[in-house]
Amino acid sequence: MRKNGRTAISTLKTIGNRIIQFAFAPFEFTAMTRSQGVFLGVLFLAGIVHWCLFLQAGESFFNSGDWAKEYKYFAVLQESIQTGRIPYHVSYPLSLMDTQRFMAIPETLSLFWPPTLLLTFLDIQAFILANTLILYSAGFAGCLLIRNRYRLSPFVFFLLFTLFNFNGYLTAHLAAGHSMWVGYFFLPFIAYFLLKILEEQDGWAAAGWLAISLLGIVLQGAFHMFIWCLLFLALVLIGTRKFRSRTQILAAILLGILLASLRLWPALLLGDVLRGVESGYSSWGLLLNALIRIQPWSLEITPGIFFWEYDFYISAVGLIFILVFGIVFRFYRDKRLAEVRYPGLDLALLVMLVLSAGNTYQWLANHIPVTLLAVERVPTRFLAIPFLFLLVVACIRAQRTIQPICRKPVVAFVFLAAAVALLILLASHSYAWRAAIVKPFHDNRLTAPLIVRLPDAPYIHRLHIAMLVSLVTGMGLAGIWLVRRIQCSAVRNRYKKQESYHG
């Protein structure tokens, strides 16, 4: 009996050591194991299941939140795809902008987003789910880029994956019917390429890809998110001291604007559509509740502004991780962290955090005559950008410091237990905020306007010119990329010939 007991204990120790070694060992691309592949596959499928359940696959969510309004947008796109007619105008005004100029509405999914072709044979709800899963997959690929570059262990990557995909900010906005919020899934690419620029690693190529990522955001109708990213990039440009990085960030901003011309320039014709700017998080208590407490959607913070505009649930576990590794370790004196302090981000993170709180942004929007400032009505939404960057740098810093601590089995299993608790807590929030649970707050009749032809030469000409600007910019970037590929291939071939000659 004693011998069997010792054997069992020894087996458990061996299994425990293997789990610890797998969970906390830095990623090595050249030593990719089957267990790592299985781990990533399980995570990816877990995300697929989450979004299918969240969007209530098989059950209509158009009777909740803003989804009835979004239905009209998708119905127009579906008619366009199925009939081959360009939706320049629709039969009656749409959106808060009260316009018949459909392709000037910046919050609609763009007709030029390739997956819209799925509307040929999918109904609208199935398409929304399919598009969400496509973009979730893109976001997962962005997280993998970050993992590969910074050699994130399975444990750290799990934290990045769960906090990025299942936080309350994203789920609450999608539950409220903000379909354009799927543009959020492009944010890992924004972080990845901006950090490459700050690290001075192939910064010009990163600037081009950063601009393409901005285009991906605006094609989803995530016009607000596009503006936040431009603001954040402009602040990083000011905050960084490296001239080369500044030049590359400026190039990314300008290229991003040119690529997005097909959405931006026509929208300027809509004129003044302002409804007043609300205040941000009015107190530390409200912000803390938004981060660590699951609140009902119906909680009205100010008249007409419900909790989905404040919700940013990441749980106490997620908050501690962000605070410790994202903020405290920025100033922690350790040689391992010297290269990942990213001082160029400090100003941008601070300003975006300040703008999301109190009446700061409200005052600026009311006193500075800049149209883009007043576009955003609810400044609490700004928090998404600093959160994403704090999450990414927290993961990078955690990877550099956490492995020696976790060599002790007790500490390692405490960390693993915290990760499991994080997943359970975020899943609880998703269940509480699932898409079909929010009551409608607009006319929820599933009617849609028809595509019509109206005489409106100034708008159509501007739209065509904007499309041409975007096309020429995209072709220019594609040409530069192709030339670089050819040059790199020529250099590699020359190097191989030299090696074979010397060999």
Image (cartoon, grey):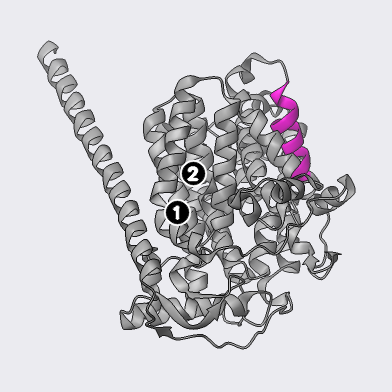
In depth, the one of 89 and 495 nearer the eye is 89
Q: Is residue 8 visible?
A: no
Measured along the vertical axis of the image, is residue 455 above or below residue 190? below
Foreground disc of the pair 1, 2: 1
Instruction: Tell me where residue 262 appears, x and y as whole percent.
Output: 40, 58
The quarter of the image holding the N terminus is top right
Q: Residues within 10 Å of mark 1 (few under 14, many from 20)?
A: many
Q: Amino acid at mark 1?
A: Gly
Residue drawn 20% across and 29% down? 487
Measured along the vertical axis of the image, is residue 314 above or below residue 204? below
Is residue 319 within the magenta segment? Answer: yes
Between marks 1 and 2, how big is the CA–CA gap?
10 Å
The numbered mark, 1 or 2, whose residue comes first in the sequence reads 2
Secondary structure of the residue carrying tag 2 is: helix
Instruction: Tell me where residue 312 appears, x and y as whole percent.
Output: 74, 53
CB atoms of marks 1 and 2 within 8 Å: yes
Q: Amino acid at mark 2?
A: Phe
- In terms of secondary structure, what is the magenta stretch mainly? helix
- The magenta segment is 317-331
Q: Identify residue for label 2.
A: 189
Q: Identify residue for label 1.
A: 216
